[in-house]
Structures are given as C-alpha cells and as structure tokens.
Amino acid sequence: MRATNWEFENRAAVFGMIFGFSFPLYALDHQNATASLANILAPKISADPDHLAREIFFAAAALLTVAVLIRVWASAYLQAEIVYAKEVKSEAFVADGPYRRVRNPLYFANVLMAIGMGSMMSRAGLVLAIVAMTVFCYRLIFREESELRASQGESYERYLRAVPRLWPSLWPRVPSSGRAAHWSAGFKAESWYWGFPLSVLGFAITLRLWVFFVVFGAGLALFWTITSSLQKKAAPK
C-alpha cells in the first residue's frame, strides 16, 4: 500500500496525471458535475439551475482558497525544500502549527483541491479525481510514516497516537513546541497553488472556459518552475 520510490520522487507528476485523466472523461460522461448537482437541487429549493450552478462554482473557488491557505500554513512550518524534496526527509518531524491538528495537512489540502477542481469536471471525472487523489495521498503517507517510524522511534509513535492522519481535529492534539512560522517562505512556496481558486473564480465570473484554462495553465507552469527550483536546493550535495 506504500508508495514506491518512483511514485514519491515523481508525486507532482502523478498529481498532474490524476487531473490529466479526470478532465478528459467528458468524452464518456458529457454532463458537468456542477450542472448535474444544480439540476438536482434547484427544484427542491425553488432556485434557477443556472444561477445555482454559478453559486456552486463560487463555493468551489472558496474551498480551493481554503486549501491554498492550509498549504501555506503547513509550508510556513515545514521548509519548502522538504515539502518538494524527491526523497522522504526523516531526520526530524514537525509537530507545530497545523501539524498539531493533522499529521498531513498538505495532503489534506490536496484532497480539498480535487473536490474543488472537480466542479469543472464531468461527474465521472469528479469521482475519479477525488478517489485517485485520496488513494495516492494515503500511499504517500504510508511511505513517509514507515521511514519516520524507523528514524524517530517512540517520540513519533506518541505523535501518531495523538494526531489524526489525514482528517483534521478541530482542536490541537499536542502542545506547541514553539517553532516559528516563516510565512513569507510559505506563501512563496505555495504561490503556484493560487492558480486553482483563481481559475475557477475566473470561470464563475465570466462563464468562459478559456479564462479557466489560461489561469489554470499559468498556475501549473509556475508550479513546475517552483518545484524544480526547490528540488535542486533539496538535492544532496
């Protein structure tokens, strides 16, 4: 169930492939997931389906904004070079900031991202994106946990018992260690992620697909640039 070396080293590419396989499922299922949901809900609440669909797109953009802020919060406590490193960094583990509530806030944000971006997909694409993202995140988590268990011993075992793996607690499960957050580094490392909420927001405002794809593509281009740069910094000398 653990991710292989290739999967971990190329996890960014796998995340991209999940979307790459999910969006084209319009060829099999022509109904947009958001439009389908709006058509189901609208008669029950006496709403116009088109207006309701637009509101759902705005809600999806808000959800994606929450995902961005979670990743920024997590990256502010975990060095960006570790976040995007090709290998598991098991010399130490962070138990402060969002890591007091959930052990893997970055992967939790990715699941939220799949849900939010699924609003632009077909019904089949939405299901595939959420399931594939969740399963892959768990595979990565199991890989990281096995290496941290081996290197950190009992202190990490106590952390595992106290803090949920992927679904956050509403309150901190461990005391703060006093680790300082580096917010500027966190925002810089996750700057590419803003392409997700902005692309959906742009579509919700204009209802033009080209706006969505231009902003989404710009975000992906920035992602590959930042990832390549950080992985070079994190590479063993």
Image: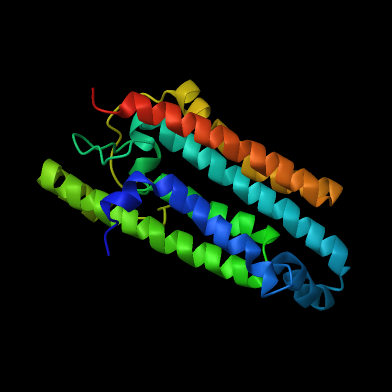
Report if residue 198 is visible in the image.
Answer: no
Give above or below for 183 relative to 161: above
Name the image quarter holding the N terminus: bottom left
Q: Is residue 84 above or below residue 123?
A: above
Residue 230 in the figure: left or right of residue 151: right
Colour theme: rainbow
Can residue 152 be seen by looking at this rendering? Answer: yes
Task: Please name whichever residue, 39 or 6, is drawn nearer the observer in this view of the structure.
Answer: 6
In the visual, does 225 lie left or right of 219?
left
Percent of width and height locating residue 156: 18, 45
Is 217 or 36 nearer to us in this picture?
217
Q: Is residue 106 left or right of residue 218?
A: left
Which quarter of the rendering shows the C terminus? top left
Q: Quadrant of residue 12?
A: top left
Residue found 55% across the figure and 40% down from its top? 68
Q: Position of residue 229 (x, y in %)?
A: 43, 26
Marks counted in the figure total 0
Q: Position of residue 217 (x, y in %)?
A: 65, 41
Q: In the displayed structure, does residue 62 sit left or right of residue 237?
A: right
Q: Residue at x 34, y 36 (%)?
A: 85
Work out whether 119 lies above or below 108: below
The one of 126 and 172 positioned closer to us in this rendering = 126
Coordinates of residue 57 in the picture (x, y in percent): 74, 55
